[in-house]
Image (spheres, rainbow, N blue to C red):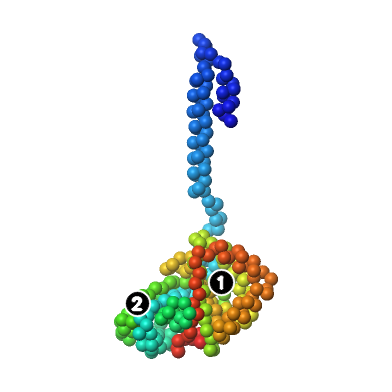
Amino acid sequence: MATRVLHSVGSGMKQTKNGVWTNGQVSLIARNLSASTNKNSEDSWFKSLFVRKVDPRKDPHSHLLAKKEESNLYKIQFHNVKPECLDAYNKLCDDVLPSITADSHYPCDLVGTWNTWYGEQDQAVHLWRYRGGYPALTECMNKLRQNKEFMEYRKERGKMLLSRKNQLLLEFSFWNEPVPRPGANIYELRSYQLRPGTMIEWGNYWARAIEFRQQDQEAVGGFFSQIGSLYMVHHLWAYKDLQSREDTRNAAWQHDGWDEVVYYTVPLIQHMESRIMIPMKTSLLK
């Protein structure tokens, strides 16, 4: 547009002693102006790639999502066991781990301990709770290093494992705290890797969604990661059997609003995984 205007204004001009520009000079100025305009436009477009609306909230997301009245910290452990060692591994855990929970000297509870039934095979999952947050975790780890039985357990355990990983978690404010329950139950651990920056949005939707999933007491606990794989969410559910799980999940679709929650939360997910787990003998979550 700028080029056409300048060409029109400069049409027929001749150079004079007063310094009137020729057509060629007008064209040169026009080309320079057009190039400058394009460059500014490109710069503006390029800079817009990095412009994001800043969240006006000043609190960390963990403060907005986690329970305020309690300072519980959770640790979830995933142990991939050599197939030939799984029975020996389970017995070792049953012999040693309950004594830690029973001893008030240690500010921690083994909330639940399972073997994965469907999902990754030959796997054990342990969920620990530290009442008192990070200081309780540090205290417990320091005391366990002085526990000869526990250190021997770790040594023997290491011979049986192919790999292991853990995460530190906080519990969502709108989920109930996991409490011991009678069996027999199967447990489902549904793990969601969210897109970075979407945890608040996820929490807002699930604060409503959990109302649809508590009628049969299937909701056990909901957590989000603080250390380890970040933007990771874990939902823990309990069912009598696989058919009960199917019936309960299908019934959720009869509630007005459940379809909306699913519709808006699915785009927040990068990856999801489901484990069906069987409680080990000494698990408090039977």
Q: Quadrant of residue 151?
A: bottom left
- Seen at 50% across and 69% down, the residue is 272
Q: Position of residue 102 (x, y in %)?
A: 43, 87
Q: Quadrant of residue 127?
A: bottom left
Residue situated in front as seen by the camera: 227 or 25? 25
Residue behind mark 2: 162
Q: Quadrant of residue 122?
A: bottom left
In the displayed structure, would residue 206 be above or below residue 215?
above
Q: Of the residues under marks 1 and 2, which one precedes in the sequence?
A: 2
Q: Position of residue 58 (x, y in %)?
A: 53, 58
The N terminus is located in which quarter?
Answer: top right
In the displayed structure, would residue 206 be above or below residue 88?
above
- Seen at 45% across and 65% down, the residue is 230
Identify residue type, mark 1: Ser
Residue behind mark 1: 173
Helix or strand or loop: what does disc 2 sit on? strand
The reply to whether discs 1 and 2 touch (Cβ–Cβ < 8 Å) is no
Q: Is residue 109 visible?
A: no
Helix or strand or loop: what does disc 1 sit on? loop
Q: Position of residue 263 (x, y in %)?
A: 61, 65
Q: Position of residue 215 (x, y in %)?
A: 64, 80
- Seen at 57% across and 16% down, the residue is 12
Q: Spatial distance from mark 1 to mark 2, Cα to Cα? A: 35 Å
Identify residue type, mark 2: Leu
- Seen at 49% across and 44% down, the residue is 46
Q: Is residue 42 visible?
A: yes
